Image (cartoon, helix red, strand yellow):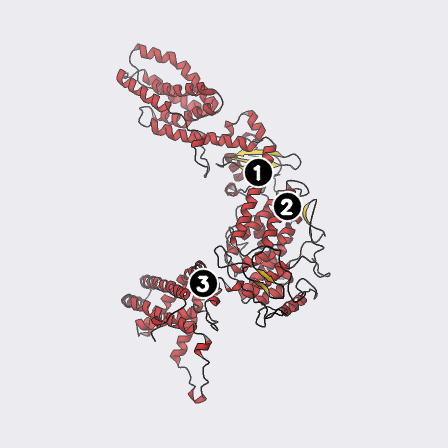
């Protein structure tokens, strides 16, 4: 029967077409690779063989693709036949048995080798694809019809069609294996996304129910009640521990409101508890592992064994200090306690490694000295959600932007900024985190968007809380935002003047002064409450300044210029004082203006027509009103501060006092900064990378000139502007990142404000650094690696 006539499951048909595309792309890449290999070949014989193979493959490339598709389709059709249709193969007599010849053995070995190469490159993506395939298999079809071994066999069949020469076959096989292994990683990822878009649900979310209402688990269940008791006993739990059976063998269910029904007769979860087929889900996890994680997550809080060294001393309760544990001991490490059960529920060595790594990380997290005990108890409730994320999503260990990592790191770093959780604002923050953690731990912790929504809620809470703190004081945030808006208006008006003054004849230095400096004075005069009169006077001064450098003919024009010059200079100084233009810049400008005035008295004057046209042109330039605040777009990028402009100079002495402005002249930049002996060295990507897992990204900088780009609202920092270090909390960042406001103190909070220029200089001088040398998970990983290294040496 022709394989093309066989009808496959529609979902598998779509996956097959995607693999066919990947094979065609790999064929094109392989053909190019043979040409590149021929150019770099060290021997003439090898180069000729590669070029010959490339030439032959180019001619037969269409045949190669067709044979690959038909071979793979035929194998998939055979995999999808149900056992009832295929029938049980009859036993052959011993006389009918025969040995495999060498060619068959070589083909099997080659197929296995190619399959291993493809599977090694696509391990994580293949696991996700496999979680969908039980939904597509016919009854009894237990093997993956998209597994790398079948693709490898199709590759060999296609190569054998292209040529009969063994050497050429070997070259084609090697090149195509390399190319196809690279293509299949993206191919498997696209297939998983394809299955999700078609509404398929991964098999790992299905928990097998009981065969009857009598309470016993199905005899085919991967993880039964009895096996759970057995492992719990091995792990040090009594028979009546958290996983002991009650009633008909069921387990304590989660709070009401969850999607899906809980079968109290030992049937486990059924229905729509969660759908990993929808977008935004974490990766695939084995069914028995998911069942065990849910049982551990939804059991009621109960004390562990009395002889456990880290046993709970009571239940969660709310007291005057927010969420607190009624005893003194920290919560236990559930992953370590149930290690044997978790390892048995996992099927691969990679999962075993992840379980051990996450268990070690929480050992370090719960013992981290920078995490307040109240926050450590809340983070302990996230052990199973974190393990779920690590088992199913390979980016958990490598990406610092992973939502689960960010959620853990952010609540830990924010907690470091509070000195007291017995009263607001620390108590309010702890209550907010307790609510978010409860929603994650008791909710659908398999969805990526759950963590993203909790992060957004946390960001909103911190922004509102810091805004309330600043409003209760001098309302520093409103003041710096107004100063920044002034700068944005000035920059917009500057661009407007630059375009309008471009065709006007005048010296270049004067055109730059009017556009970049005098525009600031005009805008500020209109927003400083001085009325329209001063703004109009400064506009007129800008027009007169251009006319003052024009050639003057005749005694009358020269006398008029000399009579207007004192008033013009007074207006110039008034405008420059308004924007606090530095004295050195003034001297440089007037040093160019005075010679220009002297030169204008020597030349041939303008004709009356040219004079009047120029005056009319300047009236049009300076008569256009400056932009208003409502004309500005939303601030989505840092404000560009002109060279030489210090935003601190825009503040009056009273405003600087209200803001607690830190000025550059008040800092002894040549003084030596005391070394903090208790501070830890910053970490690198090597310190937080674990052998056998995806390499981790470099941690965010905790000190140095790059720190200013990674400041986080609500985080704690160490600042040294005098003789000692002071712990501050970042309370506000202006929309254009030109002002940064910090607070310090507990009972009576004071503000410390600095411009972006001042803050950058502090960072470069080593006088500003993060309170933590790295985020919580990065610190835990580094300590776990160090501890493992010490044990290895011992």
Q: Residue at x 36, y 62 (%)?
A: 21
Q: Which residue is mark 1?
A: 731
Residue 597, given in percent of the width and then of the height, sits at: 35, 18
Q: Is residue 564 left or right of residue 215?
A: left
Q: Quadrant of the N terminus?
A: bottom left
Residue 677 appears in the picture as rendered: no
Q: Which residue is mark 2?
A: 431
Label 2 environment density (alpha carbons within 10 Å; few <14, some 14–19, many ≥20): some
Q: Is residue 116 left or right of residue 229?
A: left
Q: Quadrant of the C terminus?
A: bottom right
Q: Mark 2 or mark 3: which is in front? A: 2
Q: Mark 2 or mark 1: which is in front? A: 2
Q: Quadrant of residue 109?
A: bottom left
Nearest the eye: 123 or 592:
123
Decide: marks 1, 3 in contact (CB < 8 A)?
A: no
Residue 545, given in percent of the width and then of the height, sits at: 37, 19
Label 3 environment density (alpha carbons within 10 Å; few <14, some 14–19, many ≥20): many
Label 3 residue SS: loop
Residue 741 appears in the picture as rendered: yes
Please give the label number shown on residue 122. 3
Label 1 residue SS: strand
The alpha-carbon separation of the residues under discs 1 and 3 comes to 45 Å
Note whether 750 is above or below 522 in the view shown.
Answer: below
Note whether 66 is above or below 499 in the view shown.
Answer: below
Q: Is residue 111 left or right of residue 258?
A: left
Labels 2 and 3: the sequence-earlier one = 3
Note whether 731 is above or below 85 in the view shown.
Answer: above
Q: Residue at x 39, y 63 (%)?
A: 14
Nearest the eye: 354 or 377:
377
Nearest the eye: 619 or 309:
619
Residue 567, given in percent of the width and then of the height, sits at: 41, 14
């Amino acid at each position: 029967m022709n394989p093309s006539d066989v009808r496959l499951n529609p979902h598998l048909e779509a996956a097959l077409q995607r693999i066919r595309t990947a094979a065609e792309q790999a064929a094109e890449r392989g053909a190019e690779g043979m040409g590149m290999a021929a150019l770099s070949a060290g021997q003439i014989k090898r180069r000729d063989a590669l070029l010959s193979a490339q030439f032959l493959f180019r001619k037969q490339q269409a045949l190669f693709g067709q044979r690959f598709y038909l071979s793979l389709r035929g194998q998939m059709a055979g995999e999808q036949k149900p056992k009832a249709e295929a029938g049980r193969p009859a036993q052959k007599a011993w006389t009918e048995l025969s040995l495999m010849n060498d060619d068959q053995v070589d083909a099997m070995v080659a197929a296995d080798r190619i399959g291993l190469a493809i599977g090694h490159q696509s391990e994580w993506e293949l696991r996700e694809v496999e979680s969908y395939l039980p939904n597509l298999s016919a009854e009894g079809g237990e093997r993956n019809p998209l597994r790398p071994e079948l693709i490898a066999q199709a590759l060999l069949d296609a190569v054998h069609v292209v040529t009969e020469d063994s050497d050429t076959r070997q070259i084609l096989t090697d090149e195509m294996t390399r190319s196809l292994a690279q293509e299949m990683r993206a191919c498997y990822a696209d297939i998983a996304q394809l299955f999700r878009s078609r509404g398929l649900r991964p098999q790992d979310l299905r928990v097998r129910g009981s065969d009857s209402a009598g309470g016993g688990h199905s005899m085919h269940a991967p993880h039964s009640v009895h096996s759970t008791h057995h492992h719990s006993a091995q792990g040090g739990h009594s028979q009546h521990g958290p996983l002991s059976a009650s009633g008909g063998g069921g387990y304590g269910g989660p709070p009401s409101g969850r999607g899906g029904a809980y079968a109290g007769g030992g049937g486990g979860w059924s229905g729509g508890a969660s759908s990993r087929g929808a977008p935004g889900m974490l990766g695939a996890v084995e069914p028995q592992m998911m069942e065990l994680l849910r049982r551990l997550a939804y059991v009621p809080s109960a004390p562990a064994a009395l002889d456990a060294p880290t046993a709970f001393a009571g239940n969660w309760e709310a007291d005057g200090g927010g969420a607190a544990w009624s005893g003194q001991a920290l919560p236990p490490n559930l992953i370590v306690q149930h290690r044997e059960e978790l390892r048995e529920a996992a099927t691969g060595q990679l999962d075993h490694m992840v379980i051990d790594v996450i268990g070690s990380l929480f050992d370090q997290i719960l013992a981290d000295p920078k995490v307040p005990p109240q926050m450590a108890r809340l983070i302990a409730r996230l052990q199973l959600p974190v393990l779920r994320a690590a088992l199913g999503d390979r980016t958990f260990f490598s990406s610092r932007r992973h939502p689960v990592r960010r959620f853990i790191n952010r609540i830990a770093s924010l907690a470091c900024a509070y000195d007291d959780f017995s009263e607001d604002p620390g108590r309010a923050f702890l209550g907010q985190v307790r609510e978010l953690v409860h929603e994650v731990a008791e909710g659908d912790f398999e969805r990526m968007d759950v963590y993203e929504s909790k992060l957004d809620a946390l960001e909103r809470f911190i922004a509102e809380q810091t805004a309330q703190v600043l409003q209760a004081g001098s309302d520093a945030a409103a003041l710096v935002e107004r100063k920044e808006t002034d700068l944005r208006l000035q920059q917009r008006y500057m661009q407007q003047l630059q375009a309008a003054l471009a065709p006007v004849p005048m010296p270049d230095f004067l055109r730059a002064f009017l556009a970049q400096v005098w525009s600031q004075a005009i805008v500020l005069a209109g927003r400083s409450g001085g009325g329209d009169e001063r703004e109009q006077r400064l506009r007129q001064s800008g027009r007169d300044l251009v006319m003052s450098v024009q050639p003057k003919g005749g005694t009358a024009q020269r006398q008029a210029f000399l009579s207007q010059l004192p008033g013009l200079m007074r207006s110039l100084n008034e405008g420059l004082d308004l924007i606090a233009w530095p004295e050195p810049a003034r001297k440089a400008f007037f040093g160019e203006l005075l010679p220009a005035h002297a030169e204008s008295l020597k030349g041939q004057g303008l004709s009356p027509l040219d004079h009047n046209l120029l005056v009319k042109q300047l009236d049009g330039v300076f008569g256009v009103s400056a932009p208003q605040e409502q004309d500005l777009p939303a601030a989505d990028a840092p404000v560009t501060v002109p060279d030489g402009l210090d935003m601190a100079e825009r503040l009056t002495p009273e405003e600087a006092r209200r803001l607690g402005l830190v000025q550059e002249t008040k800092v002894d930049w040549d003084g030596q900064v005391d070394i903090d002996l208790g501070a830890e060295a910053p970490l690198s990507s090597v310190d937080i990378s674990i052998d056998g897992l995806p390499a981790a990204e470099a941690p965010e900088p905790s000190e140095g000139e790059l720190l200013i780009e990674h400041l986080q609202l609500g985080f704690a920092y160490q600042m040294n502007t005098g003789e000692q270090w002071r712990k501050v909390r970042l309370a506000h960042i202006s929309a254009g990142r030109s002002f940064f406001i910090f607070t310090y103190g507990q009972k009576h909070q004071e503000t410390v404000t600095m411009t972006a220029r001042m803050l950058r200089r502090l960072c470069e001088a080593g006088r500003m650094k993060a309170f933590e040398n790295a985020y919580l998970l990065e610190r835990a990983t580094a300590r776990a690696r160090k501890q493992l290294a010490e044990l290895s040496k011992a």
